[in-house]
Image (cartoon, helix red, strand yellow):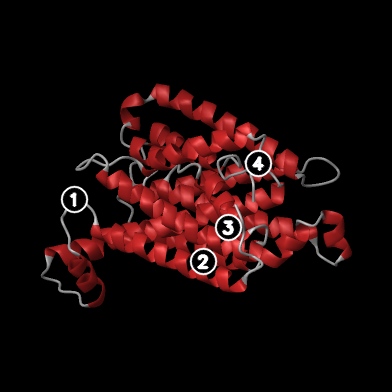
Amino acid sequence: MASFTTKPYIRWSVLVLCVLLFLSAAFTSLLLGKTPMTPGDVWMALFSFDPESTEQIIVRTSRLTRTLVAISIGASLAIAGTLMQALTRNPMAAPDLFGVNAGALFFIVFAVTFFSVESLTHYMWIGFLGALVASVLVYFLGSMKEDGLSPVRLVLAGAAISALFVSFTQGMLVLDEQRMQSVLFWLSGSVAGRDLEMLGPVLPFIVISITVAMFMGKPLNILMSGEDVAKNLGQNTLLLKLVAGAVIVLLAGGSVAVAGSIGFLGLVVPHIAKGIAGPNYQWVLPLSGLFGATLLLVSDIVARVIIAPQEMPIGAMTALFGTPFFIYIARRGGKIRD
């Protein structure tokens, strides 16, 4: 796919188009659901709220929060995936491979099985802890050699830790199948039922991490020229990797803690952004955030309406489009055209 990096007027036009697409998806997310709405109801709920209107109350108390959660999680997973692919130089790298999802799910299942935890807020904090523990283990295993942190060893360590936690999780599911019914929807990934009390504690980490990520575009461009070249230009490559790793942990771990296991978003979106913007991470990172938020919003909308009045887990929707993409990359030997 041709990139727009050499044509500034096209670059800004595409960016504006992406923003408009994102705003359209966000408005549609507020519009669609079990209760019929008109565009006027949504507009009035946002800008001229009537506390006696049932429709406007639903928009303010339910759909707006759900939309904000989807935006935050989608942008976070996409940017985390972009950073992972840049650091590891592996086009198949994603937060799933980093072991974050598996670690968070294991801690959730452990808490439910042995401590009868049922609160969604508790799930959030326990999941966040599990994501952090998994990430620390992956980092430790990936940097055991004398030459320090290796992108290849990091990926292999993530795969090993993920497989370990998945095995433990499956074992505990067998021990307490009945209790697991209460968290299956969360385990499948969802933004439904999440409120600002769940997002609030994690949101500062997400905002700070995304802000830091936006300033990493130029250093990543230099790093992509080769580590030796970057060092000769005065770049502290170790510090860059450590900061990027911390951002990945906070974005991916926080997302899993709030919304559960949502796969493939961190894999697919970076390739879409690079296909449009080329290898310039000063544009790839913000585009990934926009596309990630938009794609998760669209997935959530489809999940609401495809089997209405019931809902599908949003993780199932992202897997629906992500699996063919994964197979496509794998068949190309891990390579994809920019």
- Taking 133 as reference, is 199 left or right? left
The x, y position of residue 153, in whole percent, is 74, 39
Q: Which mark is residue 137?
A: 4
Q: CA distance from mark 3 to mark 1?
A: 36 Å
- What type is the residue that disc 4 sits on? Leu
- Taking 253 as reference, is 32 left or right? left
Q: CA distance from mark 4 to mark 2?
A: 40 Å
Give the residue at mark 1: 34
Residue at 71 percent across and 60 percent down: it is: 220
Which callout, 4 or 2, points to the residue nearer the camera?
Answer: 2
- What type is the residue that disc 3 sits on? Ile
Give the residue at mark 2: 14
Residue at 19 percent across and 74 percent down: it is: 49
Which callout, 3 or 1, points to the residue nearer the camera?
Answer: 3
Q: Nearer the viewer, residue 199 or 156?
A: 156
Return the disc, 3 or 1, that comes first in the chain's sequence: 1
Tell me if mark 1 has few (under 14), some (14-19) or many (20+) residues whose alpha carbon lies within 10 angstroms of its own.
few
Return the disc, 2 or 3, that comes first in the chain's sequence: 2
Q: Are marks 2 and 3 in contact (CB under 8 Å)?
A: yes
Q: Nearer the viewer, residue 97 or 297?
A: 297
- What type is the residue that disc 1 sits on? Lys
